[in-house]
Image (spheres, grey):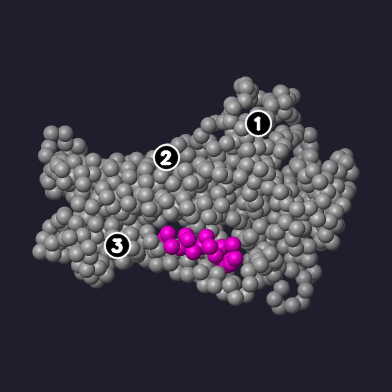
Amino acid sequence: MPSPRKSVKSFQSASTPLGFDTKAVDQTTPSTWGLFAVMHWLVGAILAFAILSPIGYHVSAIYRYNLALKWNGWFNINPKNKDRFAPGKEMLPANYFFLFFAIPVFAAAVLFSLSKAHFRAGVSHWLHVKPRFLHRLVSVGEILFVLIAVVGNILVFYHSYTFQSTLKKPVLRVVSIALGFSGLYNMVFLALPATRHSFWMEWLNLPWARAVKYHRWFGVATIVMFFVHFVIFFVQFANTDTLADELLPCFNCDIRFENSQGKDAWINVFGELSLLFMLIMGATSFPYVRRHYYATFKATHWLFIPAAFTAVMHYEQIIIWIYVSMVLYIVNRMYSSSTVAYPAALETATALPGHVTQLTFKCSTTYLPADLVYVKVPAISTVQWHPFSIASTPLHTPGLLTIYVKALGHWTNQLHDYVKQCQGEGVEPVVYMDAGYTPPTPMSSSYSSVVFVGGGIGVTPLMGQIMHLLHARPHQDVYLVWHVKTVEMLSQFHGWLRELESVAEANQGRLHLHLHVTQQDISEISIEHDEPVHKFALGAPSGVEARPYSHLSTSRKLVVLLLAFVASGALLFYVRYQQKISKINPAYWPLQRFVEFLVVVVGSFFAYGAAIIGKPTQPLAFAAATELQVRSNPKPLSKDEFVSHFNVKFERANWVQLFGEIKASQPSAETRSVGVYVSGPKALSAAIEAVTVDDALYDVHHEVFEM
């Protein structure tokens, strides 16, 4: 396998990207370090406050009988007018969520952007710990998430139920409304873990692949609450024999007035549609569907747009509740859209034997090893984006980013054939890439040793991290234990393995390789077709010039976020205050709600121009320093030479023996610790967990692939 590296010079003058080893590279002075530490933890306190503020809205002593009364004068509300829809009252909930949710979230984003380059102490490591008293079945983060979600839902339900009970409504109706508000509480946070550039997740140092799990949990809670909310109303309407009147649209009814049959029917219809869209999304989100019918899962997830819109049409205050989530989601989409306006320039694109595809991109901005990138190939699909882990490090290949793709499904098989066809016809592949997401979990410099355990192509997230350690922290013992089915799989990476040895030797690093082949009897020669199975119409270039990949700078992201909040907030305030549309004619209430939803979207996209102007277009250059004797393109070894050189073992690793040897080699200090990073099948993770679960020496991390 050819190496993308062109020079044998080291790049020691290039600083380690922040987030991987801040102790080694942070130049912040002690006096300012404390300031940035305070800013960092202030962000956490603000985010905690933001989580609590939707609950406070339902506490009558906080909002209804306190703040709302004080704000009457702000919006010229007549205190003697007790009507729920009295002029100006539409701004009271908007003001609450603006002051206690929108502004805190925006302030947290600004503070985190200013402090993250100087202080990173996310709580991700603590969140990933799996308590022994629970037999390591769940992590602290999962326990905390469930606790916050359950307590939040209980508090919202309780206070909503208490208030609705004072209105002398039937018990079933009160329960249903309270469940609806609980579902709305979950809906507020539903999109945040799913946004790939979420500063919430970055503060926690939760990679997107882990954060999306919490998105699924919020989704389940939201759908369950709304479904039960609907079922209770359905039963109530059935008992009163009003199902048709309440749940079917009425086209010749008067919809102008509150509690009229026509308006109530349409409000219920919008709620039914929203629930239907959510149920479809939920049904196509089961693991089997996601893995085997990813295109279907991805397509149906776009139903979140009509689901949110019809939810707003069902209950007009929902736009206020989800305003922040909508803006953050749209801004995150703009971050991604600005990076994929052009194809990413490729240094190399190679279809390797064994159905492995290597793509090496040129970069204008730096990255971290094991970062997640998304790739789209228009020749295969114009809408499908697929996630892959970065297998390189900018310390070793500055200005270049490499991923490896194993052909395991329909899309990845097509990618291999597409690159092979492009190679044969001398055509540059057209590939789009989106990156710059929440960084991977930091790797502590306090570890005396770091053990990387990979299974098959699952080793790719570890490849860049291993090379990074050999460059940045050669004092640490580095172990690579790699399980593969065939020698052929290992031989595809012989160049990288030889380069690992060379870098370790040049930097006086301590590298220990343990390569295991688990299925010796299987033929080592894969059957490759001379011609690709899939044929693509390569045609003439599209005229869109490929550019080195670059993502937005922190300052530019802040400008985009500020413009989005200001523009969308100002438009929403203008349209909502005194109900500009529905006061013309009460029958225009659907148009009023539609326009409120629309201006949030349009106002947020107003900031798109700031995201795409003046981006860098040249590959990132790192200053060269001393010479390193690195074999960038070593002579290929025969199979027997390869097996002998790397001492390949044709057996599964004896984990008890291996980790016993690693433990015996550790220093005797009480503060010693060994970082273990596992990436591969679940069976491999389970085997490592079983060996390390009762030993405090090992700090185990697992890569998550499930999307």
Quickly name the residue at label 2: 302
Dot 3 crowding, Cα within 10 Å, few <14, some 14–19, many 20+: many
Q: Is residue 192 visible?
A: yes
Nearest to the observer: residue 440 or residue 672 = 440
* Above or below, 492 relative to 368: above
Question: Where does the image place residue 341, in percent across and percent down from the top left?
Answer: 54, 37
The amino acid on which the numbered mark 2 sits, given as a three-letter code, is: Trp
> 305 or 354, which is in the foreground?
305
Q: For the view shown, which residue lies furthest in the left direction?
A: 80
Q: Amino acid at mark 1?
A: Pro
Q: Amino acid at mark 3?
A: Tyr
Question: How far is disc 1 from disc 2 in space, using C-alphas?
Answer: 28 Å
Q: Which quadrant holds residue 116?
A: bottom right
Query: What is the secondary structure assignment of the residue under circle 1?
Result: loop
Q: Residues within 10 Å of mark 1 (few under 14, many from 20)?
A: many
Residue 222 is left or right of residue 206, and the answer is: left
Toward which corner of the image does residue 305 lie, by quadrant?
top left
Reply above or below: 624 against 167.
above
Q: Say if 652 sits above or below 71 in the image.
A: above
Q: Badge 1 is on which residue?
A: 429
Asked if labels 2 and 1 touch by Cβ distance under 8 angstroms, the answer is no
Identify the residue position indicated by label 3 in the image. 96
Label 3, label 2: how far apart the Cα atoms are: 30 Å
Q: Quadrant of residue 592?
A: top left
Q: Position of residue 102 (x, y in %)?
A: 37, 59
Instruction: Determine whether label 1 and label 3 are within 8 Å by CB.
Output: no
Which comes before the other along the chain, label 1 or label 3? 3
Span highlighted in magenta in the image: 105-123
